[in-house]
Amino acid sequence: MKRVVPTSPARRRFLGRTAGAGAALLLGVRPDGAIAALPRTAPPAPTASDADFVPNVFIRIGPDGGVTLVSKQPEIGQGIKTSLPMVLAEALEVDWASVHVVQGDLNPAYGPQGAGGSTSTPTNYDNFLRLGATARTMLVQAAAQTWNVPAAECRAAHGAVMHGASGRTLAYGALVPAAAALPVPAAKDVVLKDPAAYRLLGTRVGGVDNSLLIAGQPLFGIDTRLPGMLYATYVKCPVLGGRPVEANLAAIRAMPGVKAAFIVEGTENLNGLRPGVAIVADSTWNAFRARKKLAVTWDEGDGARHSWAGFVAQAQAARAQSGAATMREDGDVDAALAGAARTVEAQYVYPFISHASMEPQNCTAWFKPADGTLEVWAPTQNPGAGQALVASTFNIPKDKITLHITRSGGGFGRRLSSDFIVEAAAIAQKVKAPVKLTWTREDDLQHDHFRAGGFHFLRGGVDAQGKVVAWHDHFVTFANRVEKKESDGGTASVLQPGSGANLSGDEFPGRWVPNCLIEQTPLECRIPMGPWRAPGSNVFAWVFHSFIDELAHAAGRDPVAFRLDLLGSSDMVAGTGERGVPYNAARMRNVLKAVAEKSGWGKRPFARGRGAGVAFHFSHRGYVAEVAEVTVSKEGRLRVDRVVVVADIGAQIVNLSGAENQVQGSVIDGLSTLMYPALDVDKGRIVQSNFHDYPLLRMPDTPTKIEAHFLKTDYPVTGLGEPVLPPLAPAVCNAIFAATGQRVRELPLAKADLSWS
Amino acid sequence: MSKYTLQVNGRAHAVDVEADTPLLWALRDTLGLVGTKYGCGVGACGACTVHVDGQPARACQLPVGSIGKRRITTIEGLDARAMHPLQQAWVELDVPQCGYCQAGQIMTACALLKQHPRPTDAQIDDAMAGNLCRCATYVRIRAGIHRAAEIGAGDKEKA
């Protein structure tokens, strides 16, 4: 496809006229469907003034026609800073070129601001359409009043209101004083735009920060610079859950550039302020250099007994017994297995992994003793939780904590935790100057809130017709002991499985198999855990869709037809468990049929060493099916040739460019996580330390072809940061089986010998 | 403290740091050029890629005391108007997700295009293998390099 950068002088003049200081980007959709990008200089961030029209906290229009839209959600690479303002702009009837997007601070007026669980779009989309339409309605009313004509005779487009009969036009800027004097209309008096008339939504629009990103301009938390700012590093016990007893602080304070060194007591909460040693210096490197000379006596705590080999032994011991908890019990699984035509038994194992966002955790904090206020600049997905943790840890009222949300260099769930924020706050209170805490990459990998490892002991049976009649999973997972407040005011010590390490009895194929037993046994550990992109789903999809594939092959059936049968004929299937959610099997059958069709499933024969695999998964409100085609060389080298993705995330793709980028990224992230990363635990320590021994996928392993298809349905518009990732791993592993006859049951894949002869 | 004069983006900058300070931190903390990113500190991710006398180098592995008069180019100095063909292509194809690694990607790609003005996919894979993108925008990075090669060829024809 030929793409041309427009060079027409006329175009340039037009762009020049709308230009000011700063930089942004205008994109439109060209007739050939390619992204057309017109680099331009953005309007200057309009200065807020009392003369502006501010119909709500997200929209501000100045008398000069400048439109400022607030991005309330944290931007972590999911594209929300572009896509939610697009929703406002569409409803408001302004040209994207006239829009200036600013990142909002943490502010109760904006409502919840956490970016996790692919919720930013579904929880804001309808409201933003309404907010934009409300503002547009007021501008139309203002014009109608000015012209003394009925509002119904006026319409808004391109940042102006037109009166059809008389041909008169007034730009929004000129309507600002009149619109600002109007009351905000009731919801019933606001007509939402007909989706058929959308001009911006569904097109490919470039990220609003792109032109700053490619010029290396400051945007990220780690780029924060303040007058008089100091730089900190924070050293925690290598044994997870341990604490410092004493350290050579005097020697450290004598190192070049070091301004302070002290022990922070911390709290018991494994996901809160961990105890450690802070070193504060006049530069990041002077702090990092000093920590190399730091000698600490640690109280390692009982986490020191942990090792991965020990966990494996514990899991094998647990396997011989019933699970500690029964998550689901339908029918009689033992009887069904005894009567099945074919049975399969297998164990699946996956390791702890880290998030490894490219921007290491960091936070800048400034405590002002005079008024007891704390100002925070944080690359966080969860600013409200960050503020709350700081408030509860230090007993600072929330209204004294200002939190600026910076762009994040990747999130993947890591920045839903607030440990780095509360550490910066602890250090800031000691040094009484602005201080930027930067974690080393080693800190980041070894003191993550990890994606838990896990063990699944599975048994399944199919009948003579090739239908699944029995399903038994005993899931051995990991849990931390926590003190929980009880309703009577007391506390109870409970084992709480890590985020994404707690299996719902409704996880597919629970609810679809007549004889189904799902059990769970937690292994207690001191390893902090947290949500990792598509929590739970990122491993459950791999385990269950690999095992479903084993059953399909045991039954001698086509993997797509077998899955369509398994999905049954009901449409909505209600949730039954505490965490269960309704599952629309009709939507899943549709994406599964579509991916079979788009990929040409079953139409082409594959030579030995080549094969195709299929998987689907419902998570984060998205229905996704994927087909992977792979080549495995005789020597066992894997190449993913093609991945076809079909996703149903509702009635509207907001930003097609962002959506395609998320699909490609999720596929490659899924493949990377399948192939490479794994953390060993030894004597309570994480063994791996940096990208040399914690590899991630690089460009040469990128699949040759990734195809994204979106099924447009009548369902609510939902998010895309997560749901495409889970089906990738099982689709690839099922393709490896088709290619080689080898079943991958332990991650990472790179450790498996895939050679064949 | 030792005093060094660094040639960065065509200008001489005095930096007052210890000799062992990696160029990365002198750029970021001393000179305020934060486009060069910290990712790993061991030369394994490519986020801190700069040019030293036109060759790509990992700024986290270069002690300031070892640099001497060599010319440093950072992302901020790649093009005065941020309109290098790679920068144009990155915007045109909407390459970034989080964007943290992209300055390093562009600096590595720039060196590749100097060596191979119309690189093949294999040459791109080879040259870019040292640069991690955790968001995995590799498909668009590859497309962006091809597009930049086209833009660069067009610019040459005009010149």
Image (tube, coloured by chain):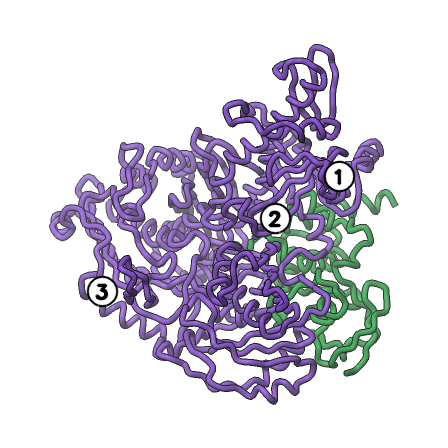
Mark 2 residue element: loop
Q: CA distance from mark 2 to mark 3?
A: 50 Å
Mark 1 residue element: loop
Residue type pointed to by label 2: Gly
Residue A493, label in figure: none
Is residue A592 something that shows in the picture?
yes
Q: From the top left corner, tell me how far across and down residue A21 is, in percent.
A: 79, 46
Q: In terms of sequence position, does the residue under pointer 2 or pointer 3 come before the other?
A: 2
Q: Which chain is green?
A: B
- Asked whether A730 or A623 is in front, the reply is A623
Label 1: how many residues lie within 10 Å, few (<14), some (14-19) or many (20+)? few
Label 3: how many residues lie within 10 Å, few (<14), some (14-19) or many (20+)? some
Is residue A349 something that shows in the picture?
no
Q: CA distance from mark 3 to mark 1?
A: 62 Å
Can marks 3 and 1 be said to lie on one chain? Answer: yes
Residue that numbered label 2 is attached to: A104
| Residue displayed at 40% across by 73% down | A681
Q: Chain of mark 1?
A: A
Mark 3 residue element: helix
Q: Which chain is purple?
A: A
- Asked whether A154 or A308 is in front, the reply is A154
Q: Which quarter shows the N terminus of chain A?
A: top right
Residue that numbered label 3 is attached to: A319
Residue type pointed to by label 1: Val
Q: Chain of mark 2?
A: A
Which circle, 1 or 2, is nearer the viewer?
2
Which circle, 2 or 3, is nearer the viewer?
2
Q: From the top left corner, tell me how far across and down residue A653 is, in percent.
A: 53, 35
Residue A5, label in figure: 1
